[in-house]
Image: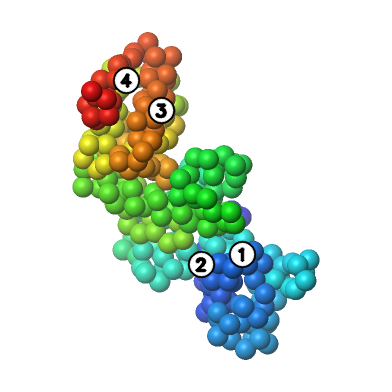
Amino acid sequence: MAQIYRAANFVRELEPEDIRVLVGIELGHRRFSHVPIEQISFYCRYPRPETQFRLDKLHKLGLLQRSSQLGYIGYQLIFESYDILALNALGEKEVIKAVGSPIGKGKESDVYFGQSPDGNEIALKIHRIGRTSFRKVRKLRNYIKNRKHISWLYVSRLSAESEFAALQRIEPLKLDTPKPFAQNRHIVAMGLIDGQELSTIPQLENPREILDEILMQTERFFLEAGMIHCDLCEFNILINPDNEIRIIDWPQWEESTHPNAFSYLKRDLVNIQTFFTKNYNTTFEIDEVLRSCKLID
């Protein structure tokens, strides 16, 4: 059974006291990689015997890591327990009712169908930073900045927060990006969109029109929303049967006022130019786009 389905089952099966202990460990992670029992008890507001009982239960279920190598016994959340906390919170907020089949899997996220309480299908994007090297993530994700001690769970949460903020900011442009519904911890609930990844389409009938649309949207993101995608490439562009494009995957976005805005936008444009030149012998003048975005004279 996939991890997210196990987590969904645990949301139904665990007692509120168990969830509260998981939250207590999460709070303790602000100071400890492995949280001491005394701290967990403090954050939960439970007596130590009750806290220990819940910790033993959760550990036996495989939802916690326990270590006694630090001079004390400490507990650490894992991605599955983090899934439980996020799904539980989204359920309490009446955002989701159930988790469905997978839609896709990337290097740093899983996407599943979800069901809202009113029966509509939505998408659940679960950020799982850690599949690539931490050094690479630290280099590419400015929201990590100079933090010396940071967990994969927290980085995944920051990634989800960044993407949710991007989708909220883009929504008024009506460019068919996913509609943002809610975000909790490392999970973003969003609207479903149709389309096939540009990189997997054998042959475009009208590559020039598709390219022009991508460039138009890129300019609108920059000029009207003040945003740069910062990871724009053929893997983050969907095209539906009506040749409408949807630009997705926004956790790395940056402000158009960022000191490195020129290099970030140029890097995105080079990625697009490389793909269309290689596959369709179709190109464009990068400087024209940069000039339209007022980054060069």
* Comes first in the chain, label 3 or label 4: 3
Kindly identify which numbered label has been placed on residue 85. Answer: 2
Q: Nearer the viewer, residue 147 or 233?
A: 147
Seen at 39% across and 62% down, the residue is 96
How many angstroms separate mark 4 from mark 1 (CA)?
Answer: 46 Å
Identify residue type, mark 1: Leu
In the rendered structure, the answer to whether residue 113 lies left or right of residue 226 reads right
93 over 150 or under it: above or below: below
Q: Where is residue 264 in the image (x, y as percent from the top left)?
A: 39, 33
Residue 149 in which image quadrant: bottom right
Mark in the foreground, 2 or 3? 3
Crowding at dot 1, Cα within 10 Å, few <14 / some 14-19 / many 20+, comes out as: many
Return the mark for residue 267: 3
| Coordinates of residue 225 in the picture (x, y in percent) | 24, 43
Q: Mark 1 points at which residue?
A: 77
First of labels 4, 1 by sequence position? 1
Asked whether disc 2 touches disc 1, contact meaning CB atoms under 8 Å apart, the reply is yes
- The kind of secondary structure element at disc 3 is helix
Which quadrant of the figure contains the N terminus? bottom right
For mark 2, give the secondary structure.
Answer: helix
| Viewer-side residue, 41 vs 176 | 41
User: Mark 3–mark 4 contact, CB under 8 Å?
Assistant: no
Q: Distance between the residues labelled 2 and 4?
A: 45 Å
> Separation of disc 2 and disc 1 at Cα?
10 Å
Mark carried by residue 286:
4
